[in-house]
């Protein structure tokens, strides 16, 4: 009997969690992409959390689930508060963990995704074969079907130096620390994965807790994978699972087809929280200084060489204003009240 046959006899249970914020039409497209796999594996359930979108998302999603008769496997949960990505996922994960029959696996799936056939079960089969793997993630595709084969290394002082400086010879020397990691079509262990399609073993949540709600948006999955790594769990990239991801539909920050928008304050808050929480205040402050100096050198070189500007507007001043040293007394709090707002311009 093959592994696929044995799983079919006693399928592990999976809860897919989708957090919506004003992308309800894309969520419905994503749910439609799951229909065939849910029919093949009835142990899959889906929870859609509406993160207080403030538009017609709740009504639209309720109607779509009812009209398409998806209510046997899909549930809508209005959160009543926009507490961010980790908060939204935890709204669905927490009660599932506390239930009498918690799922074996949780798949965190972005609202702007569409799963290719078999995407969920490819991750389940991989997890069933590798008991030390606590987190695994899909290979992603752009909307046009082209691959986006990227996983990530944990951010560090050296990765921030490379991010700011952008000199080819330095990047080659620091290749082992550069955060984006281009992947082949082979399974591989990685530091962390995009939360666009990330499967988590139930025991990981039970051991390290839920995602940190102190992050409003960005860095929460990086932090979660780091806590899992410190607890002894492995994280793997599984390209046999394919998911289309449009990226940046709720925020416009991570769009891949155009120059990004000005970074919102919560992006800087999340970055600062990650470094201070995991490496201490001094490391975070030194890392900020290194990035600032490196980025100023890049800007000077860009002007001299007449290179185009690929960065978000006001990046240097926004970074300085939101740096660890300039925000020593703000602590690690999130900026949920600043959703969608650009960083304040110091003048």
Image: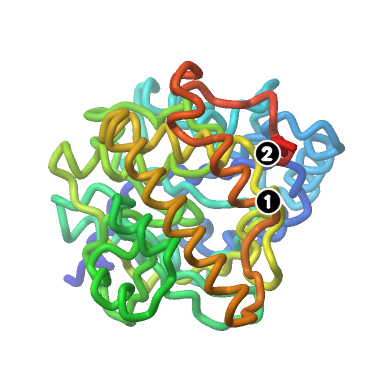
Residue 243 shows which numbered tag?
Answer: none
Residue in the foreground of this view, choosing between 110 and 254: 254
Residue in the foreground of this view, choosing between 221 and 97: 221
Residue 293 in the image, given as x and y percentages of width and height: 43, 53
CB-based contact (under 8 Å), mark 1 and mark 2: yes
Can I make out residue 31 in this image?
Answer: no
Residue 181 in the image, given as x and y percentages of width and height: 34, 70
For image coordinates 37% across by 64% down, the residue present is: 162
Residue 209 vertical position relative to residue 197 in the rendered view, above or below: above
Residue in the foreground of this view, choosing between 146 and 102: 146
* In the image: residue 299, left or right of residue 70: left
Q: Secondary structure at mark 2?
A: loop
Residue 346 vertical position relative to residue 317 in the rendered view, above or below: above
Residue 314 shows which numbered tag?
Answer: 1
Residue that mark 2 sits on: 343
Q: How many marks?
A: 2
Mark nearer the viewer, 1 or 2: 1
């Amino acid at each position: 009997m093959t592994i696929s046959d044995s799983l079919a006899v006693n399928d592990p249970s999976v809860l897919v969690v989708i957090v919506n914020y004003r992308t309800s039409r894309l969520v419905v497209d994503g749910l439609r992409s799951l229909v065939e796999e849910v029919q093949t594996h009835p142990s899959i359930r889906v929870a859609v959390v509406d993160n207080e979108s403030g538009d017609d998302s709740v009504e639209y999603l309720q109607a779509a689930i009812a009209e398409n008769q998806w209510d046997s496997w899909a549930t809508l949960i209005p959160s009543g508060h926009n507490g961010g990505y980790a908060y939204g996922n935890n709204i669905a994960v927490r009660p599932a963990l506390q239930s009498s029959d918690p799922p074996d696996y949780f798949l965190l799936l972005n609202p702007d995704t569409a799963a290719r056939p078999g995407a969920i079960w490819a991750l389940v089969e991989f997890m069933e074969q590798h008991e030390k793997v606590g987190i695994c993630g899909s290979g992603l595709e752009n909307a046009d079907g082209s691959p986006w084969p990227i996983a990530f290394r944990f951010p560090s002082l050296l990765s921030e130096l490379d991010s700011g400086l952008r000199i080819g010879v330095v990047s080659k020397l620091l290749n082992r620390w550069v955060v984006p990691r281009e992947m082949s079509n082979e399974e591989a262990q990685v530091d962390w994965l995009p939360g666009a399609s990330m499967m988590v073993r139930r025991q990981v949540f039970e051991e390290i807790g839920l995602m940190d709600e102190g992050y409003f948006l960005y860095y929460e999955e990086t932090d979660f994978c780091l806590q899992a790594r410190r607890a002894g769990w492995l994280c793997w990239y599984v390209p046999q699972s394919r998911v289309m991801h449009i990226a940046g539909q709720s925020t416009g920050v991570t769009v891949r087809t155009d120059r990004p928008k000005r970074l919102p304050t919560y992006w800087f808050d999340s970055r600062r929280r990650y470094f201070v929480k995991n490496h201490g205040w001094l490391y975070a402050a030194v890392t900020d200084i290194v990035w600032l100096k490196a980025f100023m050198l890049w800007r000077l070189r860009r002007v001299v060489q007449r290179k185009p500007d690929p960065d978000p507007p006001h990046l240097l001043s926004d970074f300085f204003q939101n740096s660890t040293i300039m925000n020593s007394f703000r602590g690690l709090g999130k900026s949920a009240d600043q959703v969608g707002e650009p960083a304040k311009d110091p003048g």
